[in-house]
Amino acid sequence: MKNGKLQVAVIGCGGIANQKHFPALKSQEDKCDIVAFCDTLKERAEKAAEEFGAEGAKVYEDYKQLLQDPEIDVVHVCTPNVAHCPITVAAFEAGKHVLCEKPMAASTEDAQKMMDAWKKSGKQFTIGYQNRFRTDAQALKRACVEGKLGEVYFAKAHAVRRRAVPTWGVFPDKSKQGGGPLIDIGTHALDITLWCMDNYKPVSVMGSVFEKLGHLPEATEGNMFGPWDPETYEVEDSAFGFVKMENGATIFLESAWALNVKDSREAATTLCGTKAGAEMVGGMSQEGYDLVFNETTGGILTEEHISDTGAIAFFEGANGGNDATKECKQWLEAILNNTESLVKPEQAFVVTQILDAIYKSAAEGKEIKLN
Ligand SMILES: NC(=O)c1ccc[n+]([C@@H]2O[C@H](COP(=O)([O-])OP(=O)(O)OC[C@H]3O[C@@H](n4cnc5c(N)ncnc54)[C@H](O)[C@@H]3O)[C@@H](O)[C@H]2O)c1
């Protein structure tokens, strides 16, 4: 802490750091300073330090050197997935609070190491599931807590893009990311679904993983981010999971970067309960959002649409900023006030456990049992 403010370091200064973390941290200047930047590509860290850094901000190529600085209180881990575990574990060992980008890790084993290091450290830990801070997600969670849906026994987690294979960074590189759309965007949809159901006890998982379009040159046409390189594409292009929970509730998870469907829907959920159902029709891939409650009112089947409250650019208004700003504010306040962050590590761990089991089930051609 310096002048009552948390001293924050960001490791990995690529896409998500620039689009989400730096602007969000800058919006919380009353609570923090960004004092250290690290990237194996040094020029990225230098550029970020110039644009977003506090006076005298330091630049590193090696995260181990950065972690030796006792002035740093908080570390944001924004590297490719496989690097989440070693960096997070080292940060806890160095006595820092950690916000790690989603997913928690590329495997359950790595996630377990992170959980163990966190518990030993006594520090705060959260994962970057900013979709929970969207207005529709907050409204749906509240409806679930208040019992509007009754018992939720079936859900669908939606993470389907028709053609939006990422073409920057290392997304199609299996050794750096651990997988494709399932681990990349399936993770957000599953997180929202489990959180709304408040059900973190999976018992079995069946999965199917497809590598059908990623290697086809003709499939790259019409990709939102421009054509990808089918020669270097190493991960799945779609994956599906069927998850059974201890109380019998069932979740179907669909994920794709490329799939021959009509509509895209991402970071969204459909929940079916004994009293009512709810569906996020929009989600992360849409402008605004549309949240629908399906129920019976006065003896007829009804659809209740919750509309966007709207926003005016650069004016936070009643909404209190975008999801990234809200996530950052809640996280910093949790550290400063010693309260819990909204995204709890135990919850993010179960998301990684299920995603890992879907890959395993597909590889082994059988159902995977979870404890
Ligand atoms: N929350 C979200 O919605 C969201 C969206 C996109 C990405 N992400 C996550 O953010 C992470 C990064 O994704 P991205 O799109 O920013 O990728 P990116 O490739 O644009 O950026 C990653 C950066 O990390 C650097 N890096 C790699 N290994 C490093 C190391 N050992 N030490 C320091 N720097 C290192 C790279 O040079 C690169 O600049 C991924 O885990 C991804 O899943 C989250």
Image: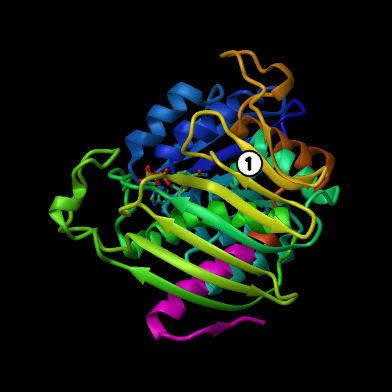
The front one of 42 and 346 is: 346
Disc 1 is placed on an element classified as loop
Q: Amino acid at mark 1?
A: Ile
Q: Is residue 170 left or right of residue 287?
A: left
**In the image as oriented, which residue stretches furthest toward the front?**
299
The residue positioned 60% from the left and 13% from the top of the image is 312
Up-down relation of residue 58 to residue 184 (above or below):
above
Q: Can the viewer see residue 180 in this picture?
A: yes
The residue positioned 30% from the left and 59% from the top of the image is 173
The front one of 265 and 217 is: 265
Up-down relation of residue 236 to residue 316 (above or below):
below
Give how far across and how far down residue 341 sits, in percent. Answer: 74, 47
> How many dots with numbers?
1
Give how far across and how far down residue 12 sits, in percent. Answer: 44, 44
Name the main secondary structure of what is drawn in magenta: helix
Mark 1 C-beta to ligand 1 under 8 Å: no
What span is colored magenta in the figure?
Answer: 349-371
Q: Is residue 74 magenta?
A: no
